[in-house]
Amino acid sequence: MGKLFNKLKINLNMYNVSNYKKEIENINCTLGLQHIRILSLSLLVVALLYFYADCVIFIGVEDKIFKVNLFSIHIISVISSILFLVFYKQLLAHRWGIRFSMLIVRSYIFFTLLISALASLNSQRLTGNIDAYIVAILVLAVLFPIEPLFMIFTFTINHILFLIGLTFMSHDPYSLISKEINSTAMMVGSLVFCYSLYRYRVKELITKNQLSQSEGNFRKVFNLNPLPMFIARYEDGKILIANDKCSEFYDYSKEDFHQIYVYDLYTDKADRKIILNKLDNNIKAENYIVEHQTSSGAKKWVIANYEIIEYMGEKCVLTNVTDITTLKEMENELLSHASTDVLTGVLNRRTGVEALRTLISSKDSSRISSICFIDIDGLKEVNDKFGHNEGDYLINKVCSVIKETLSNEGSIFRFGGDEFIILLPDKTEKESEALWCKIQAKFLEINNLGIKPYKVVTSHGVIEFTGTTNLSVEELLDLADKKMYIEKKYHKNNPR
């Protein structure tokens, strides 16, 4: 850990962080307080939903400790949000000094992560998920890219406490290992992402300070700028001047770069028009995420900043870009881990249930859709006789067959263990049953090959509904589950 800290210090010194320490702290403090305000307001908006869940949805839960813990977490979160909003303006104005304001930001990050960890540990008493902790890691890393050493300390301490609590709360060793690996990977990835954003913020700050120097030093600053930068004519987009980084980044020679137009750098030419429209209303357009391309056609994601200036007597647009291709790929990977099931690659329960919730709240009485509740028969026997690797193979085989058959007609998510849900928008029960017959036919083909010493057998239950249904997500799933159980009972009494 000591080597990591030294490496961080060396990397940050490369960008002269010490020269801008006060300004960086001001920016981090201001943005941090603004983000806390947004999160606090959002929490108060959904507070009624929290208390509805506490007092209505979980009223039938027998575990009193779970309910007390959940209610306490919600109460603490709401009270903390109200207190922050009361003193928000004074904190933003640094009435008690910037150090105190920054202490509030740091404390918010630490205790938000701690409360989220406690919420996920409490969930082990009922659902067994760690969604609250994972979401908190992602949100805090994205919204609060402040000092890396503090973030590493905060994330590490809370993660150690979380892993210790998870060890005591989880009774399934395989589930425990999976949660420990996934949460640790997410924590490390989020720290890397947070550190990259922090470095970008420092680099951007330095760039702006360099560009604020006198016009006499403009060309020198322009060519020494660490980011790709160019000036293009506003009227037709002809590039008039570009620094060395630009030629390197876009893979053009300096001579060729002066012969091209801005449109040649955009993957989607319409982006240029959108940017010009923004500049018409404001001389600046900052932090615009757009996809660019090099001379060879290679795609690169960048964060671009634009400003209208006068250059050589002409109205021009000054542009600088920061390569975020790696961050974009990392972001997509993090989002994928947060929304998909690790074993099968299909949507996880949280994402799938939200998709179903959206489907049943469409308020369109003419739109008929269906869900299909699926249970893999005999999975426990396969695990017991042939090992969990074979059980995993069976689960993946069922998912792959269903995904292949569904194509674009629906989606599948893992509900838990050997249970899966197929969402079938715009399909009646009859149409859904026809589709299920196709899936069953493929299972039969696999069984007839006799490759495995067991058969692929599933039970299902289809329920049809409209966008104006009075049923909740839980009630709809319960009906489909009961219908599936009828078939499962039949299979048990009449083995194939």
Image (cartoon, helix red, strand yellow):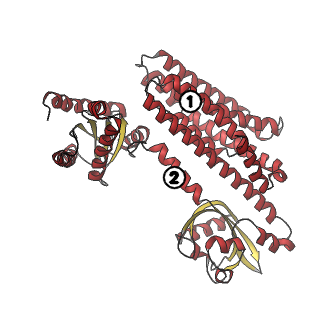
Specify whether residue 466 is in view: no
Q: Secondary structure at mark 1?
A: helix
At label 2, counting other C-alpha atoms closer than 10 Å, the crowd grade (few under 14, some 14-19, many 20 or more) is: few
- Select label 2 or label 1 by which is in front: 1
Residue 146 location, x and y as percent?
71, 45
Q: Quadrant of residue 493?
A: top left
> What residue is disc 2 on?
332
Residue named by callout 1: 163
Label 2 with label 1: CB-CB less than 8 Å? no
396 shown above or below 486: below
- Amino acid type, callout 1: Leu
Q: Specify the quadrant that holds the N terminus.
A: top right
Q: Position of residue 77 (x, y in %)?
A: 61, 28
Instruction: Name the residue rendered at 73%, 49% in the picture.
Output: 7
Q: Residue at x 75, y 43 (%)?
A: 29
User: Of residues 49 and 151, which is closer to you in this image?
Assistant: 151
